[in-house]
Image: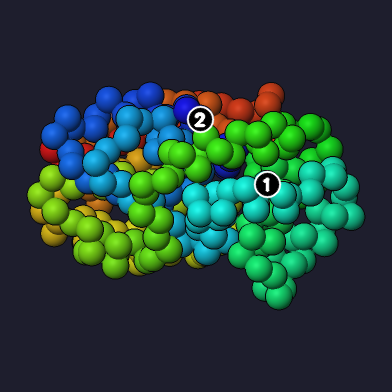
Amino acid sequence: MNSFIGWVGGKSRLKKYIIPLIPKDVERYIEVFGGAGWVFFAKPPHKIEVFNDIDCNLINLYRQIKNNCDELQAEIDWLQSRELFYEYRKQIEGQANLTDIQRAARYLYLIKTSFGSTKSSFATAPKGTYKIIEQLPRYKERLSKTIIENRDFEQLIKVYDREKALFYLDPPYVDTEKYYTAATFKTSDHNRLKAVLSTIKGRFILSYNDCDFIRDLYKDYKIRSVDRINLLSANANNRKNFKEVIITNY
């Protein structure tokens, strides 16, 4: 199944390269930077699954889909109104006094009515917002046995590391951090991520943009090159091939 979020930086086009790399003997699968979950929703389920993201609003949305799907469906108001869009964004950013279900509904509304699901600008084109209400029970079922976390990546990795664990990591790419509004990811964080991955008992699949910094940082690991269309450009005519790497420790 596909993700219901057309996120900037989502792995809709990279998943076909990532999923075949997942070893057959994996017993626990952990997505460290879950985001839109394109790889998670497309891959076959594992015995133990953990889905994590640092964005508390995103994680609240997934938790409400898992635990309170009917109430969330009832709460969502899909009026494609610019006035509502900016009001909901103000409520989310200002931490208004909302229930978890109300916050999840407004957050999903912003995702489905903004360009690139960035929640920053209103898009007038229809984006299947009515259809997603009907599809939410499918995502509820997929998430029903998933552990949903809202932790820093280093803490999460240390908690769930085991010999037959596989971590899939899709951190903010180097020099594209401006597209990720939920948290700032610094050079020190890229270094911290590499440091913790070098100590794990399990295995990892790591996706990054192809740049000298990352190639040097992970020079001791297996690096595969992948080209795809750059979707970070709003103008389709300006979209060029974007070079990425998939890094593994096996």
| Position of residue 38 measured from the top left corner of the image (x, y, whole percent) | 46, 36
Q: Is residue 128 above or below residue 87?
A: above
| Position of residue 99 measured from the top left corner of the image (x, y, whole percent) | 66, 68
Query: In which quadrant of the rendered image does the C terminus lie?
Result: top left
Indicate the amino acid at tag 2. Asn
Indicate the amino acid at tag 1. Gln
Give me the disc on residue 1: none
Q: Residue at x 77, y 66 (%)?
A: 90
Q: Secondary structure at mark 2?
A: loop
Q: Observer-nearest residue: 114 or 218?
A: 114
| Position of residue 163 measured from the top left corner of the image (x, y, whole percent) | 10, 49
Give me the disc on residue 2: 2
Give me the disc on residue 73: 1
If you read the primary sequence from the N terminus, does the residue marked by circle 2 or circle 1 appear first?
2
Q: Residue at x 67, y 39 (%)?
A: 133
Q: Observer-nearest residue: 232 or 170?
A: 170
Q: Nearer the viewer, mark 2 or mark 1?
A: 1
Residue 159 seen in this snapshot: yes
Q: How many marks?
A: 2
| Position of residue 108 measured from the top left corner of the image (x, y, whole percent) | 66, 49
Q: Callout 2 environment at 10 Å: few (<14), some (14 to 19), or many (20+)?
A: some
Q: Residue at x 68, y 26 (%)?
A: 236
Q: Residue at x 65, y 53 (%)?
A: 71
